Image: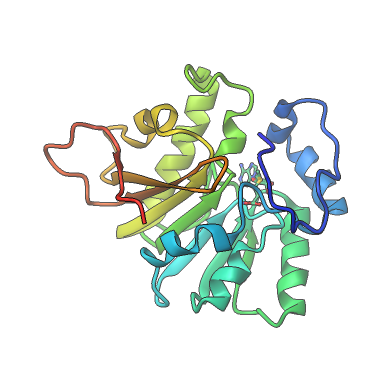
């Protein structure tokens, strides 16, 4: 799933892995983050900033899942979005992120260890939940056309938690290389009240920017996601 094509990474592909399944192992991430300062999965903020800005405003409370050592939270902060809680399962990622943000004077950004499959937050507590590449990590040992039941269980656990912590009209932004025909049937599960729309960004390779707005599913929804007009 290593699809990063950003030449500006400070350290690239520095930590080895024997197979994609390693991405499911928390020890892999701890070890990786103990050696790696910054790695931006998929693309950096500058490439999808225009899509984010259409959906987040400075008053939005934002929960980031699986932040790793990405600069997404600080880029959002620099754009005036200051109510951010940045989370990851990896204690090493969280410690490093705390240090990095403090060293840059960004102490308003909260950083917390959290399992995105079991979110330790109250119901309806965020305007926006965002993840980049974190959900993709759940799919690494599955055929995208026919994901394993264990993968579907994990993804649904994550989606139910995200839906629960979103405010009634909150949005889930999922930035992914997972294509709509592989993801829509999960996002569109009947228990969710969100509408599902998506856009693409990137040049040579297209990444997907999903926007799931809670409470916005139309009663005549045919359960299929819609592509937004290109910008
Ligand atoms: C592919 S990396 C993406 C990192 C970052 N979002 C980025 O865009 O560069 C996946 C991240 O998800 C984290 N992760 C994996 N499983 C997780 C879980 N169950 N809960 C929270 N974070 C998890 C990993 O520690 C890692 O930081």
Image quadrant occupied by the C terminus: bottom left
Q: With respect to residue 28, does 209 lie above or below?
A: below
Q: Is residue 27 left or right of residue 217?
A: right
The residue sitting at 23% across, 51% down in the picture is 215
Q: Nearer the viewer, residue 27 or 187?
A: 187
Seen in the picture, residue 53 relative to 211 is either above or below; the reply is below
Q: Residue furthest left?
A: 220
Which color scheme is applied? Answer: rainbow
Q: How many labels, in total?
A: 0
Quarter in which the N terminus is drawn: top right
Q: Quadrant of residue 123?
A: bottom left
x, y percentage for residue 152? Answer: 48, 26
Q: Residue at x 51, y 41 (%)?
A: 206
Side of 111 where 146 appears, left or right:
left
Q: Residue 82: image x %, image y %?
A: 52, 77
220 vs 194: above or below:
above
* Residue sticking out furthest to the bottom: 105
Report whether 76 appears left or right of 200.
right
Question: Residue farthest to the front?
Answer: 204
Q: Position of residue 183 (x, y in %)?
A: 42, 32
* Residue drawn at x 64%, y 53% as measured from the top left: 88
Tell me where residue 109 sits by quadrant. bottom right
Q: Position of residue 106 (x, y in %)?
A: 66, 79
């Amino acid at each position: 799933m290593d699809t990063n094509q950003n030449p500006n990474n400070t350290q690239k592909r520095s930590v080895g892995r024997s197979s994609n399944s390693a991405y499911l192992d928390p020890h892999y991430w701890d070890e990786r983050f103990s050696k790696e300062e910054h790695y931006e999965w998929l693309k950096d903020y500058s490439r999808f900033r225009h899509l984010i800005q259409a959906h987040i405003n400075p008053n939005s409370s934002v929960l980031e899942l699986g932040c790793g050592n990405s600069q997404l939270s600080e880029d959002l902060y620099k754009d005036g979005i200051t109510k951010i809680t940045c989370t990851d399962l990896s204690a090493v990622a969280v410690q490093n992120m705390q240090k990095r943000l403090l060293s840059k004077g960004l102490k308003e950004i909260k950083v917390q260890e959290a399992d995105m499959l079991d979110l330790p937050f109250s119901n309806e507590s965020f305007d926006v939940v965002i993840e980049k590449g974190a959900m993709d990590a759940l799919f690494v040992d599955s055929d995208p056309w026919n994901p394993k039941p264990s993968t579907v269980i994990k993804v649904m656990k994550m989606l139910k938690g995200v839906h629960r912590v979103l405010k009634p009209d909150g949005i889930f932004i999922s930035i992914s290389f997972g294509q709509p025909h592989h993801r829509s049937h999960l996002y569109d599960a009947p228990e969710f009240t969100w509408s599902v729309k998506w856009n693409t960004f990137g040049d040579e390779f297209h990444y997907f920017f999903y926007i799931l707005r809670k409470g916005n599913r139309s009663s005549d929804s045919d359960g299929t996601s819609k592509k937004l007009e290109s910008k």
